Image: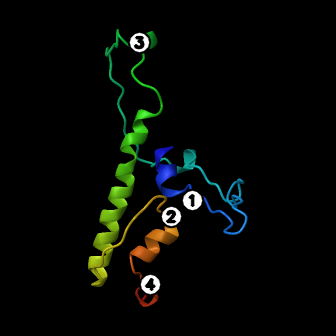
Amino acid sequence: MGIGYWLLEETIYDEKTGKNLTNGTWDYKPPTSKDIPIDFRIQLLKDAPNPIGILRSKACGEPPLCMSCSVLFALKHAVEAAQQEVGQETYFPLDGPATVEVIQQACMTDMESLKIN
């Protein structure tokens, strides 16, 4: 949910009417099971009770959203490395959502560098 918020959920409004232009499934693409990394290693804690939680719960679904901003910071570092690689280091704001188009423009990718020799 957090990755989708920072990378995919771009909302575009009509400048004249204010109507939301990205409110359908054609434009809104939330992350799905296909977006999970192939090598996804997790471990669940054994014998870790929480006697003061509601029904011994550990947390609800929203706390991980606080950490999801790390995705945006990781992308910013990756774009900075890409700019260094092409020798064009400049400041750029990286606000969410950092869509593919925003990242590509920030990397200052030259079409000549995309050709296979």
The tally of labels here is 4
Judging depth in this view, the residue of 36 and 71 nearest the camera is 71
Q: CA distance from mark 3 to mark 1?
A: 37 Å
9 vs 71, left or right, is right
The answer to the question of whether label 2 and label 1 lie on touching residues, with beta carbons closer than 8 A, is yes
Badge 2 vs badge 3, beta-carbon distance below 8 Å: no
Look at mark 1 in the image and give the residue it sits on. Answer: 10
Name the residue that disc number 2 marks.
99
Say few, some or many: other residues with alpha carbon within 10 Å of mark 1 (under 14 / 14 to 19 / 20 or more): some
Q: In front: 100, or 91?
A: 91
Q: Which residue is mark 3?
A: 56
CB under 8 Å between discs 1 and 4: no
Distance Cα–Cα, label 4 vs label 3: 54 Å
Q: CA distance from mark 2 to mark 4?
A: 20 Å
x, y percent for residue 74: 33, 58
Q: Secondary structure at mark 1?
A: loop
The disc labelled 1 sits on which kind of residue? Glu
Q: Closer to the observer: label 2 or label 4?
A: 2
Viewer-closest of 21 and 114: 21
